[in-house]
Image (cartoon, rainbow, N blue to C red):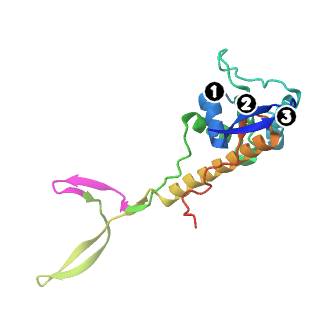
Amino acid sequence: MTLQRQVGRSGGTKVKRALGVQAALEWAFRVEQAQLELPPTTDVTDEGFGFGLEYVLLQRAALGCKVDGGQHKMGSYTHPDAEVIAAIVAGMPESLGGIRMAIRMAELARAGMTPDWMPGIVPRCVPLETKNNQHGERATTIVVGTERVKTRGKWRTVDVLACPVTWRPHPEQIASSRRGYEDWWQSLDWVRDGLVVGRMLREVGVTTTMPRRCPWKRTP
């Protein structure tokens, strides 16, 4: 854990915990068990959704008020900074996935996980179907035509067989998984900017540290 020092109004030095935004989310949702206070979906505009929550938080921070929340904690204490982080996540704009992305980010943070971008997975060409017999596992074949062949001096009609194949996992599955990771990364970047620019956290200092944007790409 890194520490940041911040000079207060009285001239004293206040030590703040320095966390990357992903670590800050995991602290808020996993350790402090903060809950998303999601607004109702009715009468909410795309632009007003994220801005409204940020505005309220900024006003409360300026007045020195404690952020409301923790209604699902059954009386147990949740750190105010964790509540602020949860409120910022809950204000995810629709352009970045809105409520669905907010829920996904919170669930991943609670589990201490990063979205699965299928590292090391390479599509393989495999038979579409297989069957087992006394000789072991064999690829299923289908008849795709007939041919006339001459064997032992006689012409015969024989079936032309082919083995249908597919790619597993399909390249589109891998591409979709990595698009999902990039969407999460952009949302994480938005949360980081909101926390850094808003300066609403009192005991946690969010750093510029971010996970790799495209970890499947080799760095030069």
Q: CA distance from mark 1 to mark 2?
A: 10 Å
Find numbered disc 3 in the image and state the secondary structure of the residue it sits on. helix
Position of residue 30 measured from the top left corner of the image (x, y, whole percent): 59, 31
Find numbered disc 1 in the image and state the secondary structure of the residue it sits on. loop
Check disc 1 and report the residue beneath it: 32
Q: Earlier in the sequence, mark 3 or mark 2?
A: 3
Find numbered disc 2 in the image and state the secondary structure of the residue it sits on. helix
Check disc 2 and report the residue beneath it: 81
Position of residue 190 measured from the top left corner of the image (x, y, whole percent): 73, 46
Seen at 65% across and 32% down, the residue is 28
Seen at 62% across and 55% down, the residue is 213
The quarter of the rendered structure image containing the N terminus is top right
> Tag 3: Cα neighbours inside 10 Å, few (<14), some, or many (≥20)?
some
Residue 77 sits inside the magenta stretch: no
Check disc 3 and report the residue beneath it: 58
The front one of 6 and 99 is 6
Instruction: Give, as a three-letter code, the residue at label 2.
Output: Asp
Q: What are the residue bounds of the magenta stretch?
A: 126-137
Would you identify the image quadrant in which residue 98 lies?
A: top right
